[in-house]
């Protein structure tokens, strides 16, 4: 095959190091068929180099066609099949994202020059003569039998990434179904090979070679792929290296009338993030938190990743579509983490992340305890997560309630000091009036109780408003208590203490339900959201452990 180099130079800058052509062909020409060709061929020991870098490019032990046939009368080329033994190909993406295969192709203007050099002066009418040789009105027909591949190797490297990437697929075996360019039946392809030392790759697809964008299906399966090997891609798209773990992928794509739809399942085992690597254009994703949210107690992440796109769009890139889907998944998970946690235990309430308290209280009510028990169950399934529990206060609501609580506490203490077990209801009521009047006099020394008392006198008989009057004790004592509450002061320390008590109460419920204490992080006071019922919400946050 080295003799073919001058002709090959017209099309590609490839060096032929070795290889032999074995050809058995019969030619015939007659009135019914100006040219009929049939035969068989085999190329053995092919060995080629990249003409630019002198690196291995394409090789095989054997490429065999047992039978082929061409008829000029029908303009039909038929090939019984192609059998490839131990093929090898090297594909390299350069720093500018061009490929070695594309760079090796000779441009048309260069090809014309090469043709003149190789074969002398080109005849002006040569192209027209060749066109005239084609049968008029006879479209070209091509039929190909099965293609088989046995024990192939593919080397792939990508130097356009922040970290150069390379991988090798070995033991590549499989093939394609027969092809007829006039048939509506798609061509199928099945290939399987080993990735690196212990990974598996499988391709299973069907497409129309003349119009693959009209209707195609492709299934890609990867098993036990080492995640650190993919760090060059994660750095480019997400600015992070991968330190450890293994991946299984099941990618299912369909293309119909130019629209791509993918239903992908990704399983990551024991994924560990490596260092963050600044890279221009990479998405700024909170991958650490997303991994902690998605990783189960067995170290496994199992997610479905649907993708869509238009392959007719000049800007379409399948890698970009997939990473956009990953970015959407990460964003969705980290912005609504409690929705995911609630779904783990069948609690999809929108309030799963919030514990509510009555004003000035730090008691976790039974409904909130049930919520925290469910959250603890979900946390057991996500051991990489921690919970941040802030103390919360609503200054207006808590202050108002604390004023009442402090006044009632003072009243209760005074009553407890003077009450006797044998007191009658009348005496107990009188003692309460005395206590309130004493507290009021101490708080408002310049105000007269007589005026307040007079304002709460009511007729003994409602039918005789001008008759005798009596004191409305309930209204009178409520008035005194209201004035005492209005004058009560609540120090800032009391609000801070309340906030801490609430956070401690939530943390105690979580640890009692089984969440390890080091995974519950109590934080300082924040302003709580007040609901329509006036209760104050304590909003939990998730974080990496």
Image (cartoon, rainbow, N blue to C red):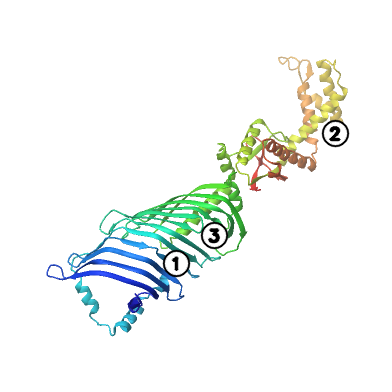
Q: Is residue 355 above or below residue 245?
A: above
Residue occupied by mark 3:
229
Q: Is residue 443 above or below residue 78?
A: above
Residue in the image at 29% along x and 82% along y: 119
Residue in the image at 26% along x and 56% along y: 183
Q: Residues within 10 Å of mark 3 (few under 14, many from 20)?
A: some
Answer with the quarter of the image where residue 139 lies. Answer: bottom left
Instruction: Identify the disc placed on residue 486.
Output: none
Q: Position of residue 544 (x, y in %)?
A: 64, 49
Q: Nearer the viewer, mark 1 or mark 2?
A: 1
Residue occupied by mark 2:
443
Of the two numbered discs 2 and 3 on the same chain, state the one appearing first in sequence: 3
Q: Secondary structure at mark 2?
A: helix
Q: Residues within 10 Å of mark 2 (few under 14, many from 20)?
A: some
Q: Marks 3/1: CA distance?
A: 17 Å
Residue occupied by mark 1:
91
Of the two numbered discs 1 and 2 on the same chain, state the one appearing first in sequence: 1
**Farthest bottom residue in view:** 121
Q: Foreground residue, 323 or 229? A: 229
């Amino acid at each position: 095959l080295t003799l073919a180099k001058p002709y090959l130079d017209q099309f590609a800058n490839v060096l032929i190091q070795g290889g032999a052509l074995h050809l058995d062909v019969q030619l015939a020409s007659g009135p019914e068929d100006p040219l009929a060709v049939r035969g068989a061929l085999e190329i053995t020991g092919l060995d080629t180099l990249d003409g630019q870098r002198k690196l291995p490019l394409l090789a095989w032990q054997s490429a065999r066609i047992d039978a082929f046939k061409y008829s000029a009368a029908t303009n039909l080329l038929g090939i019984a099949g192609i059998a490839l033994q131990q093929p090898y190909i090297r594909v390299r993406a350069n720093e500018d994202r061009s490929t070695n295969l594309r760079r090796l192709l000779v441009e048309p203007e260069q090809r014309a020059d090469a043709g003149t050099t190789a074969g002398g002066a080109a005849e002006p009418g040569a192209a027209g003569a060749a066109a005239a040789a084609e049968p008029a009105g006879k479209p070209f027909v091509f039929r190909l039998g099965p293609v088989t591949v046995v024990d192939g190797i593919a080397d792939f490297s990508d130097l356009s990434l922040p970290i150069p990437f390379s991988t090798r697929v070995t033991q590549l075996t499989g093939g394609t179904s027969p092809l007829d360019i006039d048939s509506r039946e798609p061509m199928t392809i099945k290939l399987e090979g080993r990735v690196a030392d212990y990974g598996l790759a499988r391709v299973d697809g069907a497409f129309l070679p003349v119009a693959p964008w009209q209707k195609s299906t492709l299934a890609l399966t990867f098993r036990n792929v080492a995640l650190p090997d993919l760090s060059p891609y994660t750095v480019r798209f997400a600015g992070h290296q991968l330190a450890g773990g293994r991946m299984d992928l099941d990618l299912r794509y369909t293309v119909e009338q130019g629209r791509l739809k993918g239903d992908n399942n990704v399983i990551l085992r024991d994924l560990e993030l490596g260092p963050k690597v600044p890279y221009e254009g990479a998405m700024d994703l909170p991958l650490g938190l997303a991994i902690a949210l998605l990783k189960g107690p067995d170290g496994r992440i199992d997610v479905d990743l649907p993708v869509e796109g238009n392959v007719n769009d000049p800007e379409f890139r399948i890698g970009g579509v997939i990473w956009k889907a990953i970015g959407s998944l990460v964003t969705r998970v980290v912005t609504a983490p409690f929705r995911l946690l609630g779904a783990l235990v069948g609690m999809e309430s929108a309030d799963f992340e919030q514990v509510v308290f009555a004003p000035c209280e730090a008691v976790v009510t039974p409904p909130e305890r049930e919520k925290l028990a469910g959250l603890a169950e979900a946390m057991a399934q996500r051991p990489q997560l921690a919970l941040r529990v802030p103390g919360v206060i609503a200054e207006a609501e808590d202050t108002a309630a604390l004023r009442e609580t402090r006044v009632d506490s003072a009243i209760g203490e005074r009553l407890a000091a003077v009450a006797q077990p044998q007191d009658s209801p009348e005496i107990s009521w009188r003692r309460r009036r005395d206590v309130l009047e004493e507290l009021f006099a101490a708080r408002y020394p310049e105000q007269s109780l007589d005026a307040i008392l007079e304002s709460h006198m009511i007729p003994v008989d409602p039918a005789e408003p001008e008759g005798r009057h009596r004191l409305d004790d309930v209204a009178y004592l409520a008035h005194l208590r209201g004035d005492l509450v209005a004058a009560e002061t609540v120090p800032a320390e009391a609000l801070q203490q309340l906030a801490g008590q609430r956070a401690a109460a939530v943390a105690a419920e979580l640890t009692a339900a089984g969440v390890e204490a080091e995974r519950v992080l109590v934080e300082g006071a924040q302003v709580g959201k007040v609901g329509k019922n006036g209760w104050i919400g304590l909003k939990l946050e998730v974080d990496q452990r």
